Amino acid sequence: MPVDDSLPGARASTGSSSSRRPVVLDVDTGVDDACAILLAAAHPALDLRAVTCVGGNAPVDDVVANTLTVLDAAGRAEVPVARGADRPLLEPAAHARHVHGEDGMGDLDWPRSSRVPDPRHAVELLRDVLLSAAAAGESVTLVPLAPLTNIALLLRTYPLVANGIREILFMGGAVAVGNATASAEFNIFHDPEAAAMTLDAAAELAIPVTMYGLDVFYAPTVSRAEAAELVAAGGRGSAELGGRLIAFQCQRFDRPAATIGDAGAVCAVIDRDALTCERRPVRVELAGSWSRGRTIVDRREWSGDRAHDPHGPAPGVIDVALDVDAARFSRLWLDTVAGRLGS
């Protein structure tokens, strides 16, 4: 399908060059999604081409409003934002206001953006950005930080976009314990069919995939004191907003520090050497009374013993994050949001 280069987002960037990695975020903003957007919008190594929205932590219209607000705070109003799927493929939505606040972004009473989203559906914006990149000989790192509904629809509807994808690095899943349930992490639990479709499509289209799951998600943290320093910057910019988002989490969960959460996945795009991964077959459990939405990470040394396991290894073999240099990611996020990095 042809791409209309006159539309915002067909080549949306600010002074992009070969030294900056093109990225697109797919979000359900969300306190930690907001932290991730602030990082992607400000770090000089990244060229943020677009942000697409899906229902998850909050209803999709709140997600869109939150995303526009965060980009305004970051001084990146030119980055196109599009509304995507408002619910999982098969089930009703199940939001997470108990974690993220009634508005999905900490109920901070932050000045809201007056902008409106891109007129395209999120899947169409993703299509246009990725096909445009492919036509220009570029490839984009796609960073889903939300239920994978938009990504599943994209890869199954427009498989040619694979030509414009460098890799998919998604926040979701877990090798060990879940959070939405004892088995399942929230993003996968919210739409397990979409997650399964995404992994299958990526395998078929030879798109590299990295899973940044709960095994590393909680490790990079920012303290109350560090958050207070950011808030003191004032000016309603990235630093103050980032500090208030961390402070909200510390207060809500009565802890001295809070995770940067989804922002860790963006850190992994910038500084992959701080992440320890294993390449493993991964499936998504779509049934099971207690395990629906679990990512089944196969850590066996496969000998092809079909007598005991008739399923064989999963077709989707991906990089699974198992450890992280948490202090390195925390410092990367703090320095970027505080404006201490050179551009």
Image: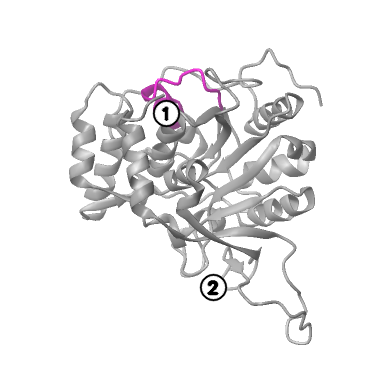
Instruction: Say above or below: 82 vs 179.
Output: above
Instruction: Say above or below: 8 vs 341.
Output: above
Label whose residue precedes the other's in the sequence (2 or 1): 1
Q: Residue at x 78, y 48 (%)?
A: 205
Residue 129 picture location, percent across and down: 66, 27
Any part of residue 85 in sight: no
Instruction: Say above or below: 336 vs 98.
Output: above
What's under tag 2, amino acid-wise?
Trp
Question: Where, quadrant-wise, is the N terminus in this rendering?
Answer: top right
Any part of residue 88 in sight: yes
What's under tag 1, amino acid-wise?
Ala
Instruction: Report the number of numbered marks.
Output: 2
Instruction: Say above or below: 254 vs 295.
Output: above
| 290 relative to 138 in the view: left or right | left
| 264 relative to 318 in the view: left or right | left
Q: Residue at x 57, y 34 (%)?
A: 23
Q: Which residues are magenta?
A: 65-81
Q: Residues within 10 Å of mark 2 (few under 14, many from 20)?
A: few
Q: Residue at x 61, y 17 (%)?
A: 8
Instruction: Please identify the residue farthest to the top as the structure is shown.
Output: 6
Q: Is residue 75 magenta?
A: yes
Q: Nearer the viewer, residue 72 or 39?
A: 39
Q: Nearer the viewer, residue 54 or 328?
A: 328
Q: Residue at x 62, y 45 (%)?
A: 168
Residue ID for mark 2: 290
Residue ID for mark 1: 42
Q: Is residue 41 magenta?
A: no
Which of the 4 image quarters holds residue 105?
top left
Element assignment for label 2: loop
